[in-house]
Amino acid sequence: MKNRLRVLRAERNWSQADLADRLEVSRQSVNAIETGKYDPSLPLAFRIARLFSTSIEAIFSDEA
Amino acid sequence: MKSPASRAYMKRSYSALACYFVILFATYTIVDRMHPVGWKLYACAALPFLPLLTTFLLTAAYLKAERDDFKRELVMRCLLWGAGASLSVSQFTGFLRIFGWQGRTPPFMELFAFCGAAVAAKITYRIANPLPAE
């Protein structure tokens, strides 16, 4: 799954650690999601969408 | 950054591990000096398993409490590697024994294989996926 997490984070000038703190997850998790090595669970995807005040579809897109 | 669930888990696990070594040493000393037989020997052999069982229960509680899905998945992956290594050792020696192998393997080899493989899996992941500098 592709995602715009890195772009959205950069727009706000947040580091991975900042984003991890806001999402209450580890920096490892943020990095894994950004690099596409891990797809977040639905609750985490909702938390991310809520944090960036947008929809899940605006952040994550199916590669197929 | 360790999550609160992870910190609590580590603290409790270290306590359980310390209990394991104390009980193991105590039961070893008792059996070595008093040479119990029958159910007393079985009881001595079963005692060190209790802290290990506690560790598994703590792990189950941690997996339930951990809010970080990715970390949870990582722990599951490491545990799977540990279980795989442990069962492989057991399978290997068991197979040899079927055909009359009389050799001896070090005691607690399955346990060491489990811990070693789980730790190796975690280290391998960290090396393969380093965090970029910020």
Image (tube, coloured by chain):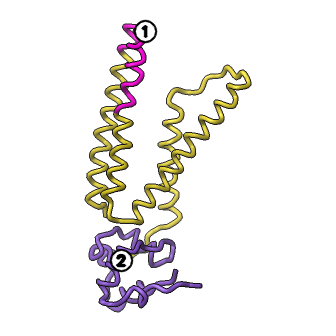
> Is B122 above or below relative to B51?
below
Give the Cα separation between the discs numbered 1 and 2.
Answer: 60 Å
Specify the subunit that label 2 lies on. Answer: A
- What residue is at 31 percent from the left and 87 percent from the top? A52
Q: Residue at x 36, y 70 (%)?
A: A27
| Side of A13 where B93 appears, left or right | right
Image: magenta residue range: B30-50
Residue A3 magenta-highlighted: no
Q: Residue B124 at x, y = what percent?
A: 52, 57
Q: Colour of chain B?
A: yellow
Residue visible at 64% across and 31% down in the picture:
B93
Foreground mark, 1 or 2? 1
Q: Specify the colour of chain A.
A: purple
Above or below residue A39? Residue B30 is above
Amino acid type, callout 1: Val
Image quarter of residue B30:
top left
Helix, strand or loop for disc 1: loop
Query: Quick one: label 1, few (<14), some, or many (20+) residues within 10 Å?
Result: few
Residue B35 lies within the magenta run: yes
Instruction: Quickly name the residue at label 1.
Output: B37
Residue A11 position, x and y percent, is: 35, 92
Q: Specify the amino acid type for callout 2.
A: Gln
